[in-house]
Image (cartoon, helix red, strand yellow):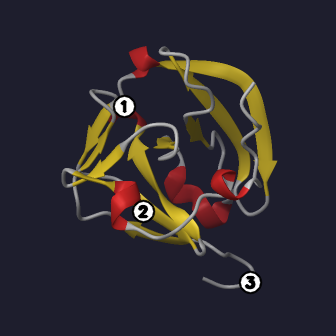
Amino acid sequence: MTDDNPFQIHPEARRITVGSGLAVSDHALRVEQPPVMPAWYLPAGEVDGRFLIATNHCSYIQWVGETCWFDLVDGTSNAAWLHPDPSPLLAALGDRIAFDPHRVTIYLDGEPALASTRFMSPASRGIGPIPAPR
């Protein structure tokens, strides 16, 4: 992590399960940007796309590039995102989807992610690209 790239990307050794059937992966990448809670990026092929609804909401995030958001079919808004063309610094995130652990439960080897970390998401601090719920 440097001033030119505040992110650290690591292969996740734990099995990631998202919600009840949204996704299961043994191939996730953990992206850290302290003090923000880590994000787990799962290969798009390991996410059940039947539960995702692409939105018209895309934003631009420095160092990352364009970020496009998904709602869930149950009505949960902005629950997941992807970077369709990530910056060269984060090229490993291409064709991967991440989920907001404040909007859907993410399990790390069966334990809820929010219970296993003390980080806060930008949304929980009232900042970041996720708009306020309607």
Disc 3 on helix, strand or loop?
A: loop
> At numbered mark 1, what does the secondary structure look like: helix, strand or loop?
loop
In the picture, measured across the screen, residue 4 lies left or right of residue 36, that is: right
Q: Are marks 1 and 2 in contact (CB under 8 Å)?
A: no
Question: Is 64 in front, or is 103?
Answer: 103
CA–CA distance in space, label 3 to label 2: 19 Å
Q: Nearer the viewer, residue 106 or 54?
A: 106
Q: Is residue 4 above or below residue 36?
A: below
Name which residue lies at 29% across and 49% down.
107
Lower sequence index among marks 3 and 2: 3
| Mark 3 to mark 1 CA distance (whole Å) | 32 Å
Q: Residue under label 3, please give it.
A: 3
- Residue on which the image places disc 2: 30
Tell me what residue is drawn at x 79 percent, y 41 percent: 59
Label 3 Cα crowd, 10 Å radius (few <14 / some 14-19 / many 20+): few
Q: Which amino acid is tagged 3?
A: Asp
Q: Earlier in the sequence, mark 3 or mark 1?
A: 3
In this figure, which residue is indicated by the disc labeled 1?
Answer: 47
Specify the quadrant of the image occupied by residue 51: top left
- What kind of element bears circle 2? strand
Left or right: 67 in relation to 20: right
Q: Which mark is residue 37?
A: none
Residues at marks 3 and 2 touching, judged by CB atoms closer than 8 Å: no
- Disc 1 residue crowd, few under 14, some 14–19, many 20+, Cα 10 Å: many
Residue 1, position as x, y percentages in the image: 60, 82
